Image (cartoon, rainbow, N blue to C red):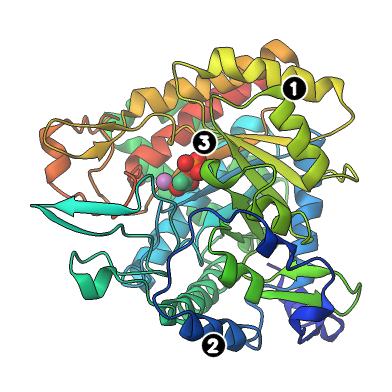
Amino acid sequence: MNVSTMIDPTEAVVEPRPETIEGLDNWRTRPTKQQPPWPDQAAADAVSEHLLRVPPLVFAGEVDQLRNQLATVARGEAFVLQGGDCAETFAGATADQIRNRVKTILQMAVVLTYGASLPVVKMGRMAGQFAKPRSSDEETRDGVTLPAYRGDMVNGYEFTEESRTPNPERMLEGYHTAASTLNLIRAFTQGGFADLRMVHSWNRGFAENPANRRYEGLAREIDRAVKFMEAAGANFDELKRVDFFASHEGLLMEYERAMTRIDSRTGLPYDTSAHFLWIGERTRDLDGAHVDFFSRVQNPIGVKLGPSTTVDDMNRLIDILDPDRVPGRLTFITRMGAGTIRDALPPLLDAAQRSEATPIWITDPMHGNGITTQTGFKTRRFDDVVDEVKGFFEAHREVGSHPGGLHVELTGDDVTECMGGTQRIDELGLETRYESLCDPRLNHQQSLELSFLVAEELAVTAS
Ligand code: PEP
Ligand code: CO
């Protein structure tokens, strides 16, 4: 997010009337999965009308910058790190929590940059990750059945009828919370907090912890590289600012549609709710509303691919979402499961290699590795997460394609939601600090540990 781009007056946007954007409402004729049943449709329509007039959260020029950076990933010249909560909450949008998450992502990115010897494109699952797909529309507790929690943008987590009833006003609160989150992210990443030397000194703190001895060697190598840059006269003032992009699952169709604007430079539609939107595993039907809508906006688009994805599904997604084969336009985020990725991914990579498409491949080692403990906690084993990442690199080595990045659910706080890592969180330990309302996240330490392990894999690939 380059501040000079943000205020360029040529990036002004015109207020669109819905009917002026050709085809943009075609999704309304398609099956639309995972939408809340708003009890009062007129109230939902009024909120949409309001959102059509609010200022954009991100600018078309920034979105283009991200697409250009992603084009370098598609060419094998950069790596992506995308991370953040499974479900952001309004209450969790505090300065401390946002800072800790940005800090964790920046720390991981430095380690990955060194390991890959490549630039790392940084994206948060942040500033808009407020809507969730659910496997069941309802939840039953002690004989009481209520609508499932669908994210703070739709309803409340509290298990009462009032809180669980979808309330469209929450879309407006989501917009404002995304705006204040983005404001902080811009300040943190442009105002000196991202200084490479400072981020590296935080990483030294991590590696000096006796539990993390295994990573001391790599941390020392990075130390020498930073000192070398200093001695060689690198301009660290330029390394104080980083580009950091916002992303979330494009799920809640009324919200995404209402946040879409025509870019006055090109006359093309951009979804200004985030720089990057991805379509989830549950809503990526080829003839569904989500694929139709996101095929018509200019943002770079991701699609989650689970273990049952066929080569035909993949090719048809490419044809619909990236008909012009624009490098950086389309990212496949695979979430196969540690036990499946080595079999399920290579045929897809191979077929993509043989076409003239250039999708980016990112691994999400979280969503294929969920388990529930006997005590009822949704969790993941750190070792399974690492194993899926290793399988991802192996598959790319086998086919000769570029492992483009990592997508993780993480937080900067010391929660206990995933098992394992050098802190050896076990089943009993999960109770200590389990805060996620949705899927379990890697905590700060586990996230850094993962980045050191991935850096080792990247170093093998780079050599
Ligand atoms: C998610 O990213 O939180 C999610 C729901 O993922 P998926 O669509 O891969 O299940
Ligand atoms: Co999740």
Q: Type of residue at label 1?
A: Ser
Q: Dot 2: what SS?
A: helix
Q: Position of residue 198 (x, y in %)?
A: 49, 56
Q: Position of residue 410 (x, y in %)?
A: 40, 47
Closer to the eye: label 3 or 2: 2
**Among numbered discs 3 and 1, the one appearing first in the sequence:** 3
Q: Dot 1: what SS?
A: loop
Which residue is nearer to you in this view: 203 or 231? 203
**Among numbered discs 1 and 2, the one appearing first in the sequence:** 2
Q: Type of residue at label 2?
A: Ala
Which residue is nearer to you in this view: 171 or 299? 171
Q: Type of residue at label 3?
A: Asp
- Residue visible at 82% across and 74% down in the picture: 21
| Residue 77, visible in the rendered structure | no
308 lies left or right of 373: right
Instruction: Please give the residue where the numbered disc 2 appears in the rendered image.
Output: 46
Q: Dot 3: what SS?
A: loop
Disc 3 C-beta below 8 A from ligand 1: yes
The label on residue 364 is 3
**Among numbered discs 3 and 2, the one appearing first in the sequence:** 2
Instruction: Please give the residue where the numbered disc 1 appears in the rendered image.
Output: 401
Closer to the eye: label 1 or 2: 2
| Residue 166, visible in the rendered structure | yes
Quarter of the figure that contains the C terminus = top right
Q: Could you classify mark 3 by the number of other residues whose Cα lies within 10 Å: few (under 14), some (14-19), or many (20 or more)?
A: many
- Above or below, 149 against 379 in this view is below
Q: Position of residue 323 (x, y in %)?
A: 87, 44
Q: CA distance from mark 3 to mark 1?
A: 17 Å
Total residue callouts: 3
